[in-house]
Amino acid sequence: MSFVNFKNVKFFSRKCNSHTLIYDEACLDIASDRDVTVWRQYTKCVECDYAKVLDSNKTGSLLVRTIWPVKYKVEDGYGPVCNGTFNFGEYGRYQLNVTKNGCSNITVTEQPDEPLFPMLVAVVTMLSIATLWYLVKGAYRKISQWEIWNRLMRTESRSELLIGSPNNGTIRRVSTRLRSADVFRGFTIALMIFVNYGGGGYSILRHSPWNGLTIADVVFPWFAWLMGFALCLSLHTRLRTAMKRQTAFFQILRRSVVLIFLGIVLSSKGRIIEELRLPGVLQRLGLAYFIVGTLECFTINASNNYLPGTAIFRDLRSTWWQWSVTLLLVGAHIALSLCLPVPGCPRGYLGPGGLHDNSTAKNCTGGAAAYIDTLVFGEDHLYKGGSFRSLYKATAAFDPEGLLGTLSCALVVQLGVQAARVLLAYSHPRPRLMRWMLWALFTGAVGGSLCLFSENNGPIPINKNLWSISFCLVTSSLAFLIQAFLYFIIDMYTLWEGRPFYYAGRNALLIYVGHDLMKGRFPFEWKLEFPSHMQLLAMNALAVLLWLSIAIVLHRKNVILTV
């Protein structure tokens, strides 16, 4: 359906049997001159058997999810009648006629909605507001330079505010933080809030059921990458101020323990102690921070004496200890994932279990990763959800933030550390940009090669649930690219100051904890009886704006949560 002919049909409250359609749902009416059986499966469900959805009936209406194309087949008492694949549109109603000569093509009886229209409206609105803001701001700055304006308002000129007045000797204070990194962190926390609150109900803003990569999947590894980036700069500064390495180590240990404790506290909401979830997002960040932080604490070059030598390898010199240990962790992750014997499961199984692989590994969700977590934590202390469960009908215990994935998470943190080393090793902006681009190309090429630049192929498919090595490398490659781009427009040429994300980036931990505590509570979220993309998008965007506003207020009051 084109945008020109768009009609917002969802408010007509269409039904499928007695069910009122909501976003990402459609209805298929089946009419036959004899009893037929209908089987269905989504194309996203890899190597899955068809599921029976209509048994020995002449007519019936089937509720269909519209996120992925649907494979279907029709049988009667004599055998197969027809089969095919169809991509349904949300809120649409469709007709399939079955006769003795076969099946008709699926036809549209009631036009579907255009799901991307609300997203288009939101993007155009935000761009318009941003453009208007910068036009007004630019006009104000231009007017404020006029001498008559300064006399009327009795204010200092912009040049005096920036470089100081020769009469009072005031100079501008230069921050030691990298502003583009704070902006990147703030953008990531804003994206995380939007995703965790629902992402407008769009599938691209939800986690992949198993293999694959969506926008929602990149948020967590970007946080880990940025944590490594900040760790290197902070540790380097502390050690250069004559802080003992033992003292720095205990600070790293304390922060790791606090992160793990906060993660367990946040996971405890609505749970009894016997089913308390032990793995989690902050828990993994805390463990990865401890691993990489300890390694850096006792091996980092605390001086700025980077020898000239070969410029292209300058940021790698004196880091062989760090990368040797990191590669050992990567090797351990791959070896355990592919070689650890798991009772009742194929060796090296990396699938979601359930219907996957024609149900031959039904109770093997996650393979070695789930097996290790079950041995260490027990099934009752693992995550019970996951988008893969509804698609693959998997019931086995599995936690996407388990122990095995922490080893590969340490690789992401170490790559963030490496990005910060580039800042320390190269003093000029251009070689920094070129070096980040080289790292982006290298990690992206290796990660893409491991999964053969596809979703389900290659020796190590890209998988957020397992934090596969290909997933870590590809998401880190994107992080290098974004950091280079933000550094170019913010720190080099000051084309953008990074507002409002800068404020959230300075207080990311407090915003993260707050958004988790307030999830499901007004005014950040409320229940919608029959939700649509437009309603969900408005509600989730409002939540992001509220938290960004809170970050601005906290910044102005100098309230920053650190551990």
Image: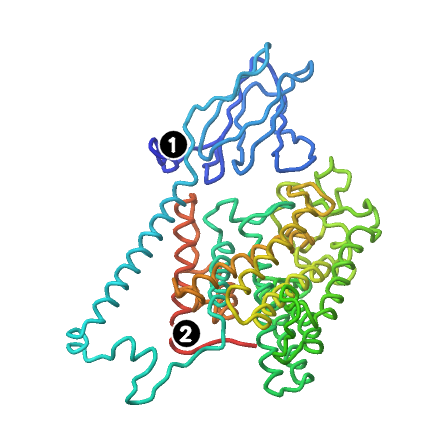
Residue type at mark 2 is His
Question: Which residue has dot 2 on it?
Answer: 555
User: Who's the residue at 48% across and 58% down the image?
Assistant: 485
Does 4 appear above or below 297? above
Is the C terminus in the top left, top right, bottom left or bottom right quadrant?
bottom right
Q: Position of residue 85 (x, y in %)?
A: 58, 26
Circle 1 packing at 10 Å, graded few (<14), some (14-19), many (20+), is: few
> Is residue 127 visible to the viewer in this orientation of the structure?
yes
Q: Position of residue 120 (x, y in %)?
A: 38, 44
Does 210 appear above or below 100? below
Numbered label attached to residue 2:
1
Q: Position of residue 330 (x, y in %)?
A: 74, 59
Residue type at mark 1 is Ser
Circle 2 packing at 10 Å, graded few (<14), some (14-19), many (20+), is: some
Find numbered disc 2 in the image and state the secondary structure of the residue it sits on: helix
User: Who's the residue at 38% across and 81% down the image?
Assistant: 172
Q: Who is closer to the viewer here, 51 or 229? A: 229
Q: Earlier in the sequence, mark 2 or mark 1?
A: 1
User: Who's the residue at 45% across and 37% down the image?
Assistant: 20
